[in-house]
Image (cartoon, rainbow, N blue to C red):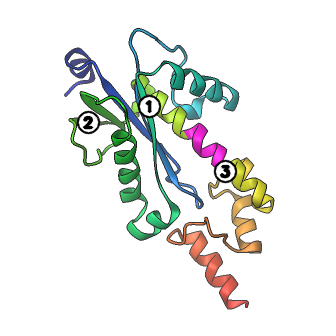
Amino acid sequence: MELEQIFAQYTRIAGVDEVGRGPLVGAVVTAAVILDPSRPISGLKDSKKLSEKRREELAVEIREKALAWSLGRAERIEIDEINILKATMLAMQRAVNGLKEHPDFVLVDGNRCPMLTYPCQAVVKGDALVPAISAASILAKVARDAEMLRLHERYPQYGFAEHKGYPTAKHLAALKEFGPILEHRRSFGPVREALSHHLNNL
């Protein structure tokens, strides 16, 4: 169905997005948001295109003005057990099921929908096209970044505050030097390699 038809036919549309599929560490975090048409929020766009300060300001406004919002997550152990794609779908289910208002329709960023009891459609580049998905991407990003900052306080040598767990050169070098921490995803190649390197050197 075209987006225009969906917007014409349904009023309570939940936007869903995820953050954290690519990092080597931590949970994958998702959000679901039903915006209130009577309380518009200006400046909603893909969270990656906003400054950290602007994301945080918008996150406060979204939580205040949305009809409903919810965060969902799948932990590192779940990611390693079922794989990152299935874990992302599970986290999206949890976000939608956590909404205090029931949506009429769900729009998900990307090319596939999780199993839901509501009608659902995937929207490629949805975080740029659908304001509710943009809002979800902002909430998920702000929540996950805050977790990475807390992890940085415990393990400053890995530089989580800077790269948020993504496999940058700095992160890979730290992984090689210090080995993985409990929060590192064992099913991801660089972590597996670092783990076997450290076990071999014991």
Is 196 in the magenta? no
Query: Label for residue 51?
Result: none
Amino acid beneath label 1: Trp
Q: Residue at x 60, y 60 (%)?
A: 25
- On-image quarter of the N terminus: top left
The residue wearing badge 1 is 69
**Main secondary structure found in the magenta portion:** helix
Depth check, mark 2 against mark 1: the one in front is 1
User: Between disc 1 and disc 3, whose residue precedes?
Assistant: 1
Residue 148 numbered mark, or none: 3
Circle 1 crowding by C-alpha within 10 Å: few under 14, some 14–19, many from 20:
many
Q: Is 186 displayed left or right of 68 in the figure?
A: right
- Mark 3, Cα crowd under 10 Å, few <14 / some 14-19 / many 20+, is many
Which region is colored magenta? 141-147
Q: Quadrant of residue 173?
A: bottom right
Secondary structure found at label 1: strand
Q: Which residue is drawn at 34% across and 37% down?
A: 108
The nearer-to-camera label among 2 and 3 is 3
Q: Are marks 2 and 3 in contact (CB under 8 Å)?
A: no
Mark positioned earlier in the residue sequence (2 or 3):
2
Provide residue 45's location: percent of width, then percent of height.
51, 25
Horizontal and vertical percent for residue 28?
A: 50, 52
> Can I make out residue 159 in this image?
no
Is disc 1 in contact with disc 3, using a CB cutoff of under 8 Å?
no
User: Label 2: few (<14), some or many (≥20) within 10 Å?
Assistant: many
Mark 2 residue element: strand
Q: Which of 130 and 16 is in front in this view?
A: 16
Q: In this view, does 159 lie to the left or right of 11?
A: right
Residue 166 image point, x, y percent: 62, 54
Q: Residue 121 carries which label?
A: 2
Name the kind of residue labelled 2 in the image: Gln
